[in-house]
Amino acid sequence: MKKVIQLMISAFLILSISACSETTSENPTASSTPQAYTAGTYTAEAQGIRSPVKVAVTFSDSKIEKIEILEHGETRNIADAALEQIPEAILENQSLAVDVVSSVTFTSRAILNAVEDACEQAGGNLDLLKSPLPASKTDEEVSADVVVVGMGLAGITASMSALDAGAKVVAVEKAGAAGGSSKYSGGFITAVQSQQQQAVGYDLDVDGYMDYFNDCEDQSVKPDETDREAVRAMIERSAADLEFLENHNVGIAGPDGFGGDFKVWHYPATRTSAFDGEAGGADHIAAGMAWLEEKENFSIFYNTPATQILTDDQGRITGVLCEKEDGSTLTVRAKAVVLATGGWAASPELMERFCPEFPSEWILPYTTAAMTDTGDGILMAEKLGAAVYEDGWWMDLAIGTDTGGYSTYFPNTLNSLINYANYFVVDKTGQRILNVNALYGPRSIAFADAMERTGEIFSIFTEEGFPAGIEFVEANQRVDDKIVYRAETLEELAQKTGMDPDVLTAQVERYNQFCEKGVDTDLGQTTLVPIHEGPYYAISIKTITMGTIGGLKTSDINQVLSTDGEAIDGLYAAGELINGKYFNQVYVSGDAQLLCADSGILAGEAAAKHALAK
């Protein structure tokens, strides 16, 4: 069995797999001073990201003996890392001063808070239980043929492919669990002429799909740097990519047409239907990691961000340098590096650099991308002279108003209600700006233009068209005349929001005429719900992004290219980090997850061949 290195608790637990150069230790552990509990089992609960987490904690008179998770409604395969690792860390250290699992912070804190409540019930010394754990620093060095940086779907498939080619693989993951942004996705993968499609008699060739793709991508308005031939090659491989996943125990179901006849989207086999839950992408991650963890030649380090790609005196790649949470280093010596670090949606600096049109106040609160997506792969590769797509964009996911990352997209939240019942969207002047039936990309283009011109965007509703949303707003007392507005007349609504009352009333009147005729000759919208009697509601809305478009430029086998167009020897990349070749401003649904799988497979195989030939 391969050795999995869990560095989530590295501040207090170090598993060394090689010689270390320095070890320091400070203060005695919190658990070295005896605790006194009233023996027994105590239950407690605390709120997680989407549900209470209930625990049962068993104590002897001096020790926490057992922690059981009794009930929770957290998202499967995302919360699991915290549900497993936090109790283990508490028991190992007899302490509540353990690190949360990065990328699963809300669930981690819920478990810690619930266990703290139980400790208090048992009469424990909370000050002692929460006192800092000792610092222990261990610099490490390990060797591999290929090092994979980032373990979302692209990193997982790259690792699988490199292992298949006979390479020894070490993976380093910045977060406390695998998944990246892929685990927050619906998990839908585009594929043409798959076995699943053939089984249901669905016939679509590559040309047919490319017609659809080109029609979508041609709606972009900025200079186009997409490589349609690279997209075609990916679509030609798509059926084989699904077979690759299934051969590595990542089951695939489908196809699905999202309610229509265009059945190209495939989803995890763990689902009973395309939309039976959230974050289906996490199921792909869990299955992929389960396969990898059985392999002798694979090891992974969590909470270990790579900070530098190492080279020798001749500029040849020799591995990566990583920094652990306690400040010590991990050096991975390898002949090839695969970067699968995702985009930069969580980096205000890189969003400003690559996506200056995106409102700065929306960057961090309004994204479902992983908070580890800070452009690390770009920054490291640029130091080696890598070429990047400077004119970037973002992948628009939804319309919303509440902050909170992927939690904002859950059912029965205001964001979800708005996103699925939107029909009349205006800018700060009151002018309609958006066909709500449009693709993600055109919506993002319209939003960027409206924000640049007027500074705010509103969705307008009445009881007639948005009963569930208005019930939610009223039941939760959300009307604050700052984000959510209510007025008896359109003129009053315009006054409260700062819109021009003449423009707003004229736009509503014109829109209602379209509703009567069933045809929108202004914007071509097909979802037409009239705005008749008040009260009227306006909600200040934003774009919720799922990631970014741009990144590193690569060859046909996903070798990173330098600014002079030459391939950088031994350096490969995959996933969102290289998607500027495939998307311009318009993200095409299902292609992002296909790109992660396909580019990871190509990069892992190429990296392994390079390393093993040395």
Image (spheres, rainbow, N blue to C red):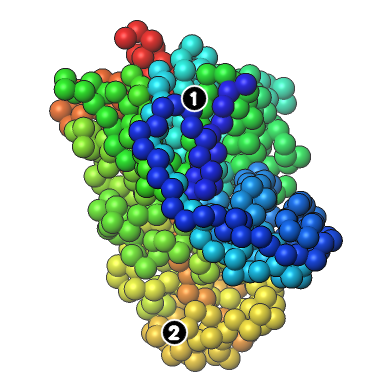
Q: Nearer the viewer, residue 266 or 219?
A: 266
Residue 542, percent across and down? 45, 66
Residue 32, percent across and down? 60, 55
Tag 1: residue type? Ser
What residue do we see at 49% from left, 25% from top? 159
Q: Nearer the viewer, residue 257 or 67?
A: 67
Q: Using residue 253 as the reference point, say whether residue 5 is left or right of it.
A: left
Res 21 quadrant in image: top left
What residue do we see at 37% from left, 68% from top? 361
Q: Is residue 299 above or below residue 89?
A: above
Which residue does the numbered mark 1 point to in the structure image? 159
Residue 403, percent across and down? 50, 67
The image quadrant where one finds the C terminus is top left
Which residue does the numbered mark 2 point to in the structure image? 497
The dot on residue 224 is none
Q: Nearer the viewer, residue 610 or 526?
A: 610
Observer able to see residue 527: no
Instruction: Assess disc 1: are there few (<14), some (14-19) or many (≥20) residues with their C-alpha within 10 Å of its C-alpha.
Output: many
Observer able to see residue 570: yes
What residue do we see at 78% from left, 60% from top? 61
Q: Using residue 402 as the reference point, say whether residue 500 is left or right of it.
A: left
Regarding mark 2 in the picture, which secondary structure is present there? helix
- Quote the CA–CA distance across marks 1 and 2: 52 Å
Q: Using residue 64 as the reference point, say whether residue 459 is left or right of it.
A: left
- Label 1 or label 2, whichever comes before in sequence order: 1
Q: Nearer the viewer, residue 28 or 613?
A: 28
